[in-house]
Image (cartoon, rainbow, N blue to C red):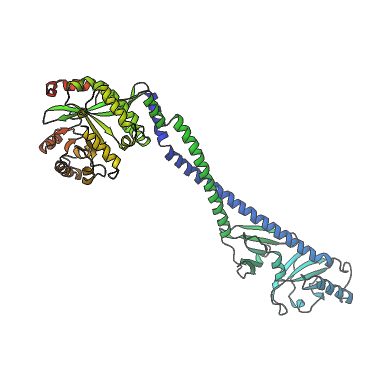
Amino acid sequence: MKKNSLHKAVFILSKQFKLIWSILTLFALALILLITFQISYEHSYKDVVEITKDLSKNLDGVIEDLFQEVYTLPIYGKNIVPCPTELKDNLKHIVFNNPNISGLIIRDKAHRTVCATNSLSTTVQAVSNNRARTLLGPFVLSLFDQPIFFIRQKIGIYYIDIELVASILKNNIETSNSLANSVVLYDDWDKKPLIKIQHSNDKWVFSSDSSAAELDEVVVTDKLHSIDGVVLKVFANKDTVNHQILVNEFLATLLTLIISYIFYLLINHNINSHYSLKRAIKIGIKEKQFYPEYQPLFDHKENRFCGVELLARWQEYEGNVIMPDFFIDEAESTGLIVPITLQIIEIAFREFQEFLKEYPNFHLGINLTVDHFQDPFFFNQFYSLKTQYGVSAQQIVFEITERHLLDTNNKHFIKKMNQLREADFSLAIDDYGTGHASISYLQSFPFNYLKIDKLFIQAIGTKAITESLNDAIIHMAKDLNLAIIAEGVETQEQVDYLVRNDVRYLQGWYYSKAVSIDKIKELIQGKKNEFTN
C-alpha cells in the first residue's frame, strides 16, 4: 500500500507539474526581480559616483590651471604697496591670455585691495576666513550679465582673488551623461549652495531652486581637492534611473521565463519519460493491469437485472486498485482510453461469454468517447473481439457521455452511429444534464437510451432546483421515444419516484455497487429464471 501511495503521489505531482513549475517560476521571478532591482540601483549609483568623480576631477584640474601663471607673479617676500606698474601689467597679461579669468585682485592681510585689473571688482566686500583657498560668491556686478565668483589663494603675505563668471564654473560641471539631472557646487562649511545647474530640454541651465532634491533620488557627493570646504553634488535623473531599472527587470523577466521554459520542457520530458501518469498508464496497458468491474442495471418492470455497465479499474503493483477518477481524465486527454477500453472489453467478453449465450436478453454497457470514434482501428478491433467471443450486437449498449459531445455537423460521426444502430447495437447518451446536449443534439444522433445523471437522481426529495429538472428530462425523453436509465439510485424514495414516473431501468447502490463477475453471478442467481426466453 505504501508503494502504491508513493507512486500515486508521484503521479499527482507529475500531473500537476505545470502548475507547480509555474508557482516555482513566479517565486523565482519575484526573487530575481528583487535582486535585479537592487543590482540596477547599485549600478546606477556607481554610475553617478563615476560621473561625480569625473566632474570634480575635471573642475580640480581647471582650477589648478588657473593658478599656474598666478604662481609666477613676483609677490613672494616683497612689499608691493603701492602696486607697481610692472605687476599690474602682469595681471592684465594673465587675464588677457586666459579666457576663463575675468579679473585678478591682490589683497593684503586686511583684505584691502592692493592691485586689480578692474576697479569695479574691488567694490565687492572682502570676505575674511582662514582657508588656504576658498570659493567666494556669487556676487552681482553691473559690469557682468551673470553672477561672478572669486577663487582666493594665499600667496606669501598676500591674497590673490581670481575672478570668474558663473558660466565658467557651469561649463566645467556639465556632463553629457543623461543619468545626471542636476549638479550643485556646495559650500560644506557655510552649508549653502554656490551654484546649481539642471538638465532641461537637452541642455544645462542655471537653476534658482536651491532646495534639496527629492529623497528618493540618487545623490552622490565628492569633495573638491582644489578648494577647501567645497563639494560637488550630482543628483541622478529619477526617470532615467527608473527606466534603466525597468529595462533590466524586463530583460531579467524575459531571460528567466525563457530559461524556465527550457528547463520545464527538459524536466517535463524526463518526468513524462519516467514518472508521469501517462507513462504509467502505458505500462499498465502493456502489462494488462486494467480490468472491468460491473455495475448492474435493474429492470423494475420485469423485476430482474437486465445488464451491467463496464467500469474500468486499474490493479497496479501489489494488488492495489486505482479507481477511474484518478486516471480517466489523463487517459481520455492522451487517447489512451481506446486501448484501455479494448482491454476491459476483451476481459468482459471472456468472462461473460457463456453467460451471454445462456441469457441473450442480458446486455453489456460500454462507455465510449469521441476518441473511440476518431480512432481508425477501434471498431475494427472491437468487431474482431465480438466475433471471437460470439457476442451478439443486441447484447451491447454503447454509452456516449455528454461531457464529450460529438459534432452534429460531422458526417463521419453520424454515419458511424447510424451504422451501429443498423447493426442492432444500442446507443445511450450518458450523464445527461451535466453537459451541453440539447434536444436538437438528441435528434441528430440515433440514441435509443437516455441516462439521467446521478446529480439529478440524488436531488430527489431534497427540494433542490435540480430535483425539479427530473420531470422535464423524463418528459422530454418520453417525447423522443428514448428509454430512460436512472443512474445513482440509492434510496427507496428515489426508487418510488422513478417507478411512479415510469422510469423502467434503475442503476445504483440501492441494487448493487460495481462488483466482479463472480459477485454479479451470485447477485443474479436468485433471479435466474427471469432470464430464460
In x, y percent, where is residue 473?
17, 43
> Which quadrant does the N terminus fall into?
top left
Left or right: residue 84 compared with residue 62: right
In x, y percent, where is residue 507?
19, 32
Please say if 437 is above or below 240.
Answer: above
Left or right: residue 354 compared with residue 45: left
Q: Residue at x 30, y 31 (%)?
A: 379
Q: Quadrant of residue 308?
A: top left
Q: Residue at x 62, y 71 (%)?
A: 208
Q: Is residue 61 visible?
A: yes
In x, y percent, where is residue 334?
38, 35
Q: Which residue is more in the foreground, 194 or 36?
A: 36
Q: Which residue is more in the foreground, 129 or 9?
A: 9
Q: Is residue 131 visible?
A: no
Left or right: residue 291 compared with residue 439: right
Please say if 525 is above or below 461.
Answer: above
Q: Quadrant of residue 422?
A: top left
Q: Quadrant of residue 417?
A: top left
